[in-house]
Amino acid sequence: MRIISTTPGTRLLTTLSVMATSVLLASCGSDSSNDSDSDASAETVSYSLQFSASVGAEEMACGEHTTLVGTADDGNGSLPSIKDFRLYVSDVQVATDDGEFVSLTLDSSDWQYENVALLDFEDGSDTCTSSTTAMNSVITGTAPEADYSRVRFTVGVPEDLNHLDSDTAVSPLNISGLHWSWAGGYKHARLDVVDWNIHLGTTGCTLDENNDNLDCTDSRPNRPTYTFSNVTLASSTINFDYAALVADSDITTDEGGATGCMSSATDPECAEIFTNLGLDVTTGQCLDDDCDSQTWVTVE
């Protein structure tokens, strides 16, 4: 994978801030009497949207945490040892209090391609032996200048990019550890602890008898969309909390299927996870508008 390493530092405070540089998009000229209108320009501004991850009040890090999570031992919980914490985010949008949502046009980089970005909260140390040292917790892009106070995004690779060949795809869609197969597509999120994994991805796509002609008509998309209001653009933090995600799960046991939850509708470990994601485990769709019932992502 061709990733440029960033400096991890301590837990990044998440801000949605206007960067200093503006880009002026000039409209094409005209010989008509409406020259003054056609010469008008639409001003766009660079924004950076940063994210963080935690285990309860603890900053996310590889290795064992001291926060008890889940329902092990009759609700006392267990201490998770983080192995991997990466997820794709797509279709990032912003809006004013009463305006329409507009897309954040993502910058091209090793972390971003078209409308999808990779967030990586592990540094390859300690128990995170199957991943990389590079980390990323920021999404950058441009949008028309405005006083934005709402944010919307989807966790997952969009359908039109979900079935690329990871061997030939560009970064960040070239990571084998975040890809199931051509028919299976990408792991929208890989959130692993020692002995218990959460792999969120689209299920139900099929191939014909010649192992060709991909059909996702009856698939479960498993892409939650989250919308947040009352965002303070200069100081808000968008945080993914593993403890909240597994609050109703016993991560020390497995009652069937793959260890943990691999997005199967019949896996007994997936029901509670999907509920906390805001998803219907049967359909893979939001339980309500924009998955508002989710419990694990907050703006701080």
Image: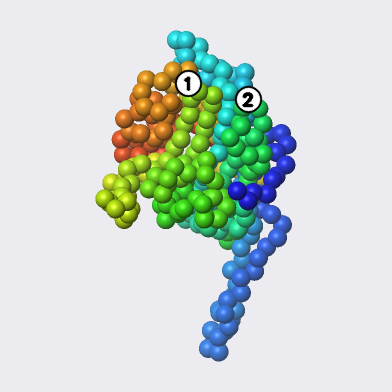
Residue indicated by mark 2: 63
Residue indicated by mark 1: 251
| Residue 227 appears in the figure | no
Q: Position of residue 220 (x, y in %)?
A: 34, 42
Q: Position of residue 115 (x, y in %)?
A: 51, 55
Q: Is residue 75 left or right of residue 12?
A: left
Closer-to-camera residue (162/130): 130
The image quadrant that residue 106 belongs to is bottom right
Q: Amino acid at mark 1?
A: Ile
Q: Residue at x 60, y 48 (%)?
A: 1
**Callout 1 crowding tier (Cα within 10 Å): few <14, some 14–19, many ≥20:** many
| Residue 68 appears in the figure | yes
Q: Is residue 18 left or right of residue 79?
A: right
Closer-to-camera residue (66/287): 66
Closer-to-camera residue (191/27): 191
Q: Is residue 216 left or right of residue 28?
A: left
Closer-to-camera residue (57/173): 173
- Report how far apart the C-alphas of labels 1 and 2 lie in the structure: 15 Å
Q: Residue at x 61, y 63 (%)?
A: 44
User: Is disc 1 placed on a helix, strand or loop?
Assistant: loop
**Callout 2 crowding tier (Cα within 10 Å): few <14, some 14–19, many ≥20:** some
Q: Amino acid at mark 2?
A: Gly
Q: Position of residue 5 (x, y in %)?
A: 69, 45
Q: Residue at x 63, y 46 (%)?
A: 138
